[in-house]
Image (spheres, rainbow, N blue to C red):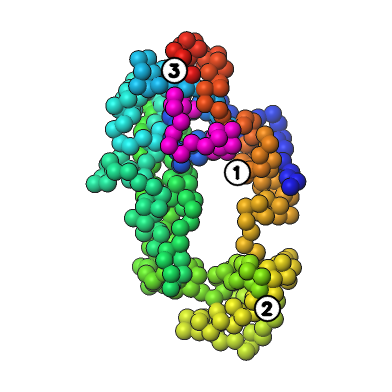
Amino acid sequence: MSHHPPDPPTRVSAGPLDGVRVVELAGIGPGPFAAMLLGDLGADVVRVDRPTPGPLAGDPAHDVTNRNKRSVVVDLKAPGGPDTVQALAARADILVEGYRPGVAERLGVGPEECMAANSALVYGRMTGWGQRGPLASLAGHDIGYIATAGALSLIGAADGPPAVPANLLGDYAGGSLYLTTGVLAALLTARTTGRGQVVDAAIVDGTAHLTALFWGMLAAGTWREARGSNLLDGGCPYYRVYETGDGGWMAVGALEPRFYTTFVALLGLDDEDLPDRADPRNWPALQARFTARFKTASREEWTAVFEGTDACVAPVLSLREAADHPHLTGRGTYTEAHGVTQPAPAPRFSATPGTLRLPPAVPGAHTAEVARDWDLPRLSELPKGHR
């Protein structure tokens, strides 16, 4: 694969968050992704790793969500461990943790302890259920959070079970992106007032927030609580995926009339011979016609037919295929850095673009660097079990 780097910087800069210091208490899922995003945008992220690998640990050298970070290892259950994290927090702008409610406090690194020496610290808390509520103390994962928030019920075919959208919708969209938005908003306030605060980012809250459009449509009577029967959930024949003759898939999003006209013409059908698309009673018949047509050619052939048009039709690509798509390679959406193909930083900035400065951090690899750069000689004096 050949990948272009992201847009080159117009001046020397690590990104728009250059100079912002972040402490990440290592966890899994949305916390590390949020810290990666802050690092991509130029923040100096120091990840505090445990002495032993986590339950889902793989090769840390290939964990892309730990790029643009440096790592120190601290045993929070050992004497001096909490003091070390507090010392880091005293020099940081943002701290991010993803423990269950009350765990950080029991370890001695909760908001009260970390903000005691740094009243301007933004303390970001990433959980599934939130810091309070009947379920707050319980374990969970993405699938359960989005199910409880109502979002999972929206996804999937009418005659099948809800479709699991990997962990993109809950962990990363409802979790990481809301945590990142929250801590950056709080940082603006802290720099204006000198006072930090705690940001309670719950995946159930963020995921529920993402469904705002559908609550409006429910109120207006334009959305049915029956999966696969609405305009945007695959029920509409001109907004769904179709299987091609070779077992591939094409995604159709021809919502507007002018795009629909182009779609139908390129599909080889006569719009005059088709039933009225505006009447949902006609959707099954339209879907049957479109299904039959897509079966007559391969995904590659249909891609060639629709490419470069305003039909709003695209092939469903795998990750590796996406990384080789001409548009994405042209923009540098995917890039190759530190020997790994991966998404480039997003979004784009005209003056202070994000960069891929560091490969995924190996636990404990940067103790001496961080001790020097953050003026924390105690880091380099940690007992063997800490680093």
Please tell me whether residue 230 is drawn above or below residue 279 in the rendered image.
above
For marks 3 and 2, give the CA distance: 63 Å
Magenta highlight on residue 60: yes
Q: Residues within 10 Å of mark 3 (few under 14, many from 20)?
A: few
Mark 3 or 2 closer to N-term? 2
Please tell me whether residue 30 is drawn above or below residue 230 in the rendered image.
above
**Observer-nearest residue: 161 or 241?**
161
Please tell me whether residue 270 is drawn above or below residue 361 in the rendered image.
below
Q: Residues within 10 Å of mark 1 (few under 14, many from 20)?
A: some
Which residue is found at the position 55% from the left and 15% from the top? 368
Which mark is in front, 3 or 2? 3
The label shown at residue 346 is: 1
Which mark is in front, 1 or 3? 3
Q: Residues within 10 Å of mark 2 (few under 14, many from 20)?
A: some
Which residue is found at the position 46% from the left and 41% from the top? 29
* Location of residue 278 in the rendering, given as x and y in whole percent from the top left corner: 52, 81
For marks 1 and 3, give the CA distance: 37 Å
**Observer-nearest residue: 385 or 255?**
385
Segment tinted magenta in the rendering = 47-66
Which residue is found at the position 63% from the left and 67% from the top? 248
Name the residue carrying label 3: 385
**Residue flagged by tag 3: what amino acid is it?**
Gly
Residue 8, by quadrant, is: top right
The label shown at residue 182 is: none
Mark 1 or 3 closer to N-term? 1
